Image: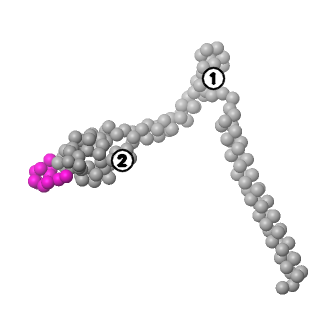
Amino acid sequence: MNLAFRGYKDKGFTAIAYFCVLLLGFLLLVVLIPMTGRGLSAVLFRETVEFRRMQYAIFNRGNEERLRAQVARVEEARRPIYELLDSFARGIDTESQISRVRDIFRRFNEELRLQSFAAKPDIFAISLLRHIQAPTARKSANSLTKCLRLPSRRG
């Protein structure tokens, strides 16, 4: 291989590597500068609506109409978040799901008695837990067995 060509190839590779490092640095700055600016404004804020409301209530400081408008805007912005949290809390409610499981189990047991099939309650409880949507109800068949007052597998 020609020594001059090897030198050009080496310098070309070095130039490309420098260009890539500069390009990555530039793209990193393009992404991080706006994120940092918004992040700092989230951490380094001057006051909240609640603080302004307290200042108005205690010291009668501020404009009442402007404060009411700000509170209304904040409540409007928070409403979807509160609704999302409420729907999530309903999914965690295990009491309603346990009562639903009891009803399903009682109906299933009644059907088995009518059809004179022998059923093992623990096996049914385990298969039933797979169909319940609450993650806390899926944790163990023993809690369901205790809840339904069923005999345990151990005897």
Residue type indicated by callout 1: Arg
When the figure is inspected, residue 71 is found, relative to residue 37, above or below; the finding is above
**Helix, strand or loop status at disc 2:** loop
> Is 119 contained in the magenta span?
yes
Gap in angstroms between the C-alphas marked 1 and 2: 46 Å
> Depth-wise, is mark 1 or mark 2 nearer the camera?
2
Q: Residue at x 37, y 44 (%)?
A: 136
When the figure is inspected, residue 56 is found, relative to residue 146, above or below; the finding is above
Q: Residue at x 69, y 37 (%)?
A: 41
Asked if residue 109 shows in the view, the reply is yes
Instruction: Verify CB contact (< 8 Å) between mark 1 and mark 2.
Output: no
In the displayed image of the protein, which residue is found farthest to the front?
Answer: 154
Residue type indicated by callout 2: Lys
Answer with mark 1 or mark 2, whichever residue precedes in sequence: 1
Where residue 33 sits: x, y (%)? 73, 47
Tell me which corner region of the image, top left, top right, bottom left or bottom right, holds residue 134: top left
Asked if residue 65 shows in the view, the reply is no
Q: Residue at x 26, y 41 (%)?
A: 146
Residue ID for mark 2: 139
| Mark 2 surroundings: few (<14), some (14-19) or many (≥20) residues within 10 A | few
Q: Is residue 101 left or right of residue 45?
A: left
First to last magenta residue range:
110-120
Residue ID for mark 1: 52
